Image: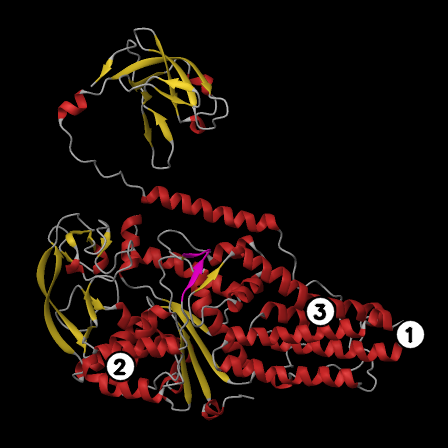
Amino acid sequence: MIYSEKDKKFKRYTVTSALPYANGPVHIGHLAGVYVPADIYVRYLRSQGEEVMFIGGSDEHGVPITIKARREGVTPQDIVDRYHGIIKESFKELGISFDIYSRTSSPEHHKTAAEFFKKLYEEGKFVEKTSMQYYDEEAHQFLADRYITGTCPHCGNEHAYGDQCEACGTSLNATDLINPKSALSGNPPVMKETKHWYLPLNEDEPWLRQWILEDHKGDWKTNVYGQCKSWIDAGLQPRAVTRDLDWGVKVPLEGTDGKVLYVWFDAPIGYISFTKQLKGDDWEKWWKDQDTKLVHFIGKDNIVFHCIIFPSMLHADGSYILPQNVPANEFLNLEGDKISTSRNWAVWLHEYLKEFPGKQDVLRYTLCSNAPETKDNDFTWKDFQLKNNSELVAILGNFVNRTLVLTHKFYGGRVPVAGPWGELEQETIREMAAIPEKVGRSIESYRFREALAEMMNLARVGNKYLTDTEPWKLIKSDSERTATVMNLSLQICANLAILCEPFLPFTSAKIRRMMNLGANLRWRDAGSAELLAANMLMEKPELLFEQIDDATIEHQVAKLLETKKQNALNAWMPAEVKPTVAFEDFGKMDIRVGTVLECTKVPKADKLLKFLIEDGMGTRTIVSGIAKFYPEPEKLVGMQVCFIANFAPRKLKGVESQGMILSAEDKDGRLVLVTPSQLVTPGCNVG
């Protein structure tokens, strides 16, 4: 049963999920924002008996892929072949139940995208424009935004890209950059004339305003509606649908060599081409029948493309349905920091699956319960551990395990015959019967965190019922009543197997296997206390979840700390040169070379070492704050160092220091003594 009145008119559902770029693996931000909620929605609809098609695939065109290929010295096809396989297998292992997961480099997609463009071109739906764009004369190539670097006009970062400064986060145009350079040759680019075709979004503004701001007001999520309204109110502008590149779907017109369809235009057509691959001649009902509900699951960075641009493309064709909803999520952060693939600040799905075998549902549960549905949210490893140990193990796993263990202990694993339901049983059944509708309504409203919490409430109901009745004690005094208690507890377990399946498919399958439920029980059956017949045989119980210990979590946190440290090293740049000084000022500094005769730690001073230096005229004592970098000071004896000889003496921890030893600070903060490359006579001047 579909609980939303609005959904009753639809015969089928076309559900799409954003196409991940095939230039790297999938991380938890992608999962929380798009794929886990989409899979929950689809699994729920299937359990309702609805006709559903769940479409996914890899976006294999665009500049990020060509940049990665160039950096690695391979072809773009090599890159997409590698990552498409990793992404597809990772999704499968996590239980993301696509009906098809294809790729935009496929011949079917190239054909479909080219035909889509050609139809709109022939019907005069595009505007042709000539403009000036950056061009690399040495590489003989127009430059996409990401192939142009320069100084950000806002923060001064000298490594900003032509579309964005990653230091301050500001969106840019390539022409905004100061001192722009080509990432291909390193040369300054020139402006050159080029011709492209544009989708005239400005002409679509009236119907888009009505369709989005009026027809879907109160229906779409506030973050989606708000972003669309902002764009429309600012005034829509024509948007290019072609680019000067070699990698992508070729523009199907004469005289357009070196031009491809812009990736934002070609990628969403992938949903259609993938449907053709899967359904053959029967594909059109999924895209052109008004009885089909189209839903796009995306992240917030794709809202405009799926709510304004792709609908404008479909509307321009004239034969396609438009999306009924686009339930975009916000961003998921990691340990308080924005997830970044370029900084390797992420939890990668394929790595998680290797390091946490058999714990797919733990990740699904954590990401759903912490999903960034209305605002950015944060994933932490400590919270992951807490969700597993205090909720999955202690609530859901505990209830199912206790019930099945007691069933085997008291009744040889068979469902006991229930007696009359008492008042407590009737109240428990009423609570259980109300939960499926609550879960269903929340899922249909795209409130997946709320839906998950309602599902877990059923496990809480079961735990409370067992605690209140104490069958392990009751069996000694009232065997008939105990049979009733255990029968109802088993019925709750069977209901949990149904209701947890959209969220925790592996757990659901495990419960079904242990209880010999098979696949017959579906959502329409949930809420009943008569799912199990008396004397049904249960299999031997197994733990649904296991505790995750502190050492496991500490290992993951340590990995992230190492990543942060490495990022800091990679981002290091020399300090700015200090203001100019006169040569005469430098001449006042008496820098000499001395030989270390003794070196010891200064008592009660963790940072200080005391050096006895032979300076050519005798000896002198110098105190230096480098103890943490030289834990064995005796090994410095015999080394020659550079020191400033004419500083006024000063006392440090009671020791008079007669100069300053020179050291260099490396990019990791380590201080290294400055020494001559070969032995010289003590007392020699440096200058």
In this rendering, position of residue 445 left or right of residue 142: right
- Amino acid type of disc 1? Ser
Residue 479: x and y in percent read: 89, 76
- Amino acid type of disc 3? Phe
Residue 420 lies in magenta, yes or no?
no
Residue that sits furthest to the right in the current view: 477
- Amino acid type of disc 2? Ser
Could you tell me which residue is drawn at 48 percent across and 58 percent down?
A: 349
Q: Is mark 3 on a helix, strand or loop?
A: helix
Residue 524: x and y in percent read: 61, 86
Residue 4: x and y in percent read: 50, 89
In this rendering, position of residue 558 left or right of residue 571: right
Q: Can residue 40 be seen in this view?
A: yes
Which dot marks residue 99? none
Nearest to the observer: residue 525 or residue 609: 609
- Identify the residue under disc 2: 312
Badge 1 crowding class, 10 Å Cα cut-off, few under 14, some 14 to 19, many 20 or more, is: few
Nearest to the observer: residue 89 or residue 458: 458
Choose the circle earlier in sequence order: 2 or 1.
Answer: 2
Could you tell me which residue is drawn at 46 percent across and 55 percent down?
A: 335
Badge 2 crowding class, 10 Å Cα cut-off, few under 14, some 14 to 19, many 20 or more, is: many
Residue 173 against residue 223 in the figure, above or below: above
Nearest to the observer: residue 156 or residue 563: 156
Residues drawn in magenta: 331-337
- Identify the residue under disc 3: 399
- Identify the residue under disc 1: 477
